[in-house]
C-alpha cells in the first residue's frame, strides 16, 4: 500500500467521498479525450423513461396533446406578475435577515479575519523557507522548484502572493516578488493564538508539499457533519436558506391547479439546502431531482430524505451535456444551485447546460460566494475542485464571480431577468455571499 493509499484508507467515508468528488475533475483534465461517459446511476425502481414521464406529464389535461414533445408541455410557471412578486418578497426578506445580530457580528469580524489570514500566509511561507530576509526575491515557479511545493498548488500560491502584494508586504516586479521585510511580520503573527500559529506552521507546509491532504485541513474532525451543519446553522447560510424558502414557498402558493412543480438541484452534496426546501413542497404535485456527481451523496440523500417520496436521486455532471446523461431538454421549472456552479471548468459552458435543462421561462435559484475571503486560503481554496476553473479571462485568480458578473453571464446565456438580493454595504455583501434569481427568456 502506498503512503497516499494509506492516508486515504484512514479517512472517514464522508472525507473519502468529498475527496473523490473533488478529484474527479482532475481525472477529467488528465484525460480530456475518450469514450462518452456512461449513463448516470439511477435510483432503485426509477428508470430514465419513468423520470422523463414524470417531467413531461407535468401539466394539466389541456397540455396532454404536447406531452410527446420534449419541453413543449405546460406553460411557464413564472409569469411577469409572479416574477415581480418573487423579486419583491426576496428583497424584503433579504433586508430583514441582513439585520440579524449574528450576521452583523460576523460581518464586523471580517476585517480582522482578513488580517489573521494574511498572517497565516506569512507564517506558512516562512515555515517553507521563503522570504525570511528583507529584499529576498522569489517567483512562484522558483518556489515550487526549490521548496518542494506541489505544482497543483500554483493557483494557491498566486493568490497568496497577490494578497501580500495588495497589503504591501511583497513588492511585485513582473513575475518576481520581493519581500519588504522578513516574514512573518510580528504585528500579524500576534493576531493569532499560539495554538493557531503552531498548527499553521506544521500543517500548511505539509499540505503544500503533499505530506497531508487538504481535506484534513477542511474537515479536521473526520466528518462531513461540520460542513453540513454550516449550511444550516451559520448566520450567512440561514440568510441564504431563508430567502430561498420564501421564494419557493411563494411559487408553491401560486402553482396553478393540476400543475406539477419540476425542480432539479445541482450538486446537492450533503443536502444542507435541500433539507430547507423539501418541507415546503406538496408531495403530490412535485418532482424534485436530487443530483450530484458522487454516488455516495446520492445514497446519503436517499437515506436522509426517505420521508419525501417525490424526490428522485440521479448523477449529473453539469460540466457535460445533460441529454446524454438521461435528462430531457427544457424539462425543469426551477433549478437550484447552492454554492456549486463556481466549481466548474468554464462558466459559459456550465450555464449553457443549465439553460438546456430549464423550460422556457424557467427559474434558476443561485446561491454563491461572490467575494474571495482570505480565510478561504485555508479551507476550500486548497480543494482541487475549487481551482478547477480554466476560463481565466473571466476568472483570473479564483473561481468566484461577483453578483454583477453572474448577472452579465446569465444574460449572455438567454436569461432575460436577473436579481441579486445582497445589497451593497450590507452584512451579507461584506461576507461575500449572495442569493440570486434568474428567469430564462420565453423564446
Image (spheres, rainbow, N blue to C red):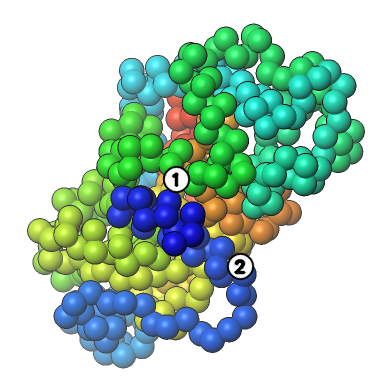
172 shown above or below 34: above
| Residue sitting farthest toward the right | 173
Residue 154 percent location from the top left of the image: 69, 47
Residue 51 percent location from the top left of the image: 26, 79
Residue 284 percent location from the top left of the image: 11, 66
282 shown above or below 122: below
State left or right for residue 33 relative to residue 198: right
Secondary structure of residue under mark 1: helix
Viewer-closest of 255 and 172: 172
Q: Earlier in the sequence, mark 2 or mark 1?
A: 2
- Label number found at residue 29: 2
* Residue 381, quarter of picture: top right
Calculate the distance from the C-alpha at mark 2 to the C-alpha at mark 1.
20 Å
* Residue 179, quarter of picture: top right
Quadrant of the snapshot with the N terminus: bottom left
Which-is-in-front pick, marks 2 and 1?
A: 1
Viewer-closest of 297 and 263: 297
282 shown above or below 275: below
State left or right for residue 253 relative to residue 431: left
Residue that badge 1 annotates: 215
- Residue drawn 54% across and 59% down? 344
Q: Is residue 242 shown to the viewer in this render?
A: no
Amino acid at each position: 500500500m502506498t503512503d497516499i493509499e494509506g492516508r486515504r484508507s484512514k479517512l472517514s467515508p464522508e472525507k473519502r467521498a468529498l475527496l473523490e468528488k473533488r478529484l474527479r475533475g482532475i481525472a477529467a483534465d488528465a484525460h480530456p479525450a475518450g469514450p462518452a461517459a456512461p449513463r448516470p446511476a439511477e435510483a432503485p425502481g426509477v428508470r430514465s423513461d419513468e423520470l422523463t414521464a414524470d417531467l413531461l406529464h407535468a401539466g394539466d389535461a389541456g397540455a396532454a396533446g404536447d406531452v410527446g414533445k420534449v419541453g413543449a408541455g405546460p406553460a411557464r410557471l413564472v409569469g411577469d406578475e409572479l416574477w415581480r412578486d418573487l423579486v419583491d418578497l426576496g428583497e424584503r426578506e433579504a433586508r430583514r435577515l441582513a439585520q440579524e445580530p449574528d450576521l452583523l457580528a460576523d460581518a464586523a469580524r471580517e476585517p480582522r479575519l482578513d488580517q489573521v489570514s494574511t498572517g497565516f500566509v506569512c507564517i506558512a511561507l516562512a515555515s517553507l523557507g521563503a522570504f525570511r530576509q528583507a529584499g529576498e526575491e522569489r517567483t512562484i515557479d522558483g518556489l515550487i522548484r526549490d521548496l518542494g511545493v506541489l505544482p497543483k498548488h500554483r493557483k494557491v500560491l498566486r493568490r497568496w502572493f497577490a494578497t501580500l502584494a495588495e497589503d504591501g508586504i511583497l513588492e511585485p516586479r513582473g513575475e518576481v516578488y520581493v519581500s519588504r521585510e522578513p516574514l512573518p511580520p510580528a504585528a500579524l503573527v500576534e493576531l493569532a493564538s499560539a495554538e493557531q500559529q503552531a498548527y499553521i506552521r506544521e500543517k500548511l507546509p505539509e499540505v503544500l508539499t503533499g505530506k497531508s491532504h487538504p481535506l484534513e485541513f477542511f474537515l479536521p474532525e473526520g466528518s462531513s457533519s461540520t460542513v453540513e451543519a454550516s449550511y444550516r446553522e451559520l448566520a450567512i447560510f440561514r440568510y441564504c436558506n431563508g430567502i430561498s424558502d420564501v421564494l419557493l414557498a411563494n411559487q408553491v402558493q401560486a402553482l396553478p391547479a393540476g400543475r406539477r412543480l419540476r425542480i432539479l438541484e445541482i450538486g446537492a452534496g450533503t443536502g444542507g439546502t435541500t433539507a430547507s426546501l423539501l418541507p415546503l413542497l406538496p408531495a403530490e404535485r412535485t418532482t424534485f431531482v436530487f443530483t450530484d456527481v458522487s454516488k455516495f451523496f446520492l445514497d446519503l440523500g436517499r437515506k436522509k430524505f426517505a420521508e419525501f417520496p417525490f424526490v428522485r436521486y440521479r448523477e449529473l455532471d453539469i460540466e457535460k451535456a445533460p441529454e446524454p446523461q438521461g435528462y430531457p431538454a427544457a424539462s425543469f421549472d426551477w433549478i437550484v444551485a447552492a454554492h456549486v456552479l463556481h466549481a466548474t471548468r468554464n462558466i459559459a459552458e456550465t450555464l449553457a447546460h443549465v439553460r438546456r435543462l430549464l423550460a422556457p421561462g424557467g427559474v434558476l435559484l443561485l446561491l454563491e460566494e461572490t467575494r474571495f475571503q482570505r480565510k478561504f486560503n485555508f479551507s476550500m481554496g486548497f480543494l482541487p475542485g475549487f481551482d478547477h476553473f480554466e476560463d481565466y479571462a473571466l476568472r483570473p485568480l479564483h473561481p468566484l464571480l461577483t453578483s454583477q458578473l453572474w448577472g452579465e453571464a446569465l444574460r449572455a446565456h438567454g436569461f432575460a431577468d436577473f436579481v441579486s438580493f445582497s445589497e451593497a454595504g450590507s452584512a451579507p455583501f461584506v461576507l461575500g455571499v449572495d442569493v440570486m434569481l434568474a428567469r430564462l427568456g420565453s423564446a
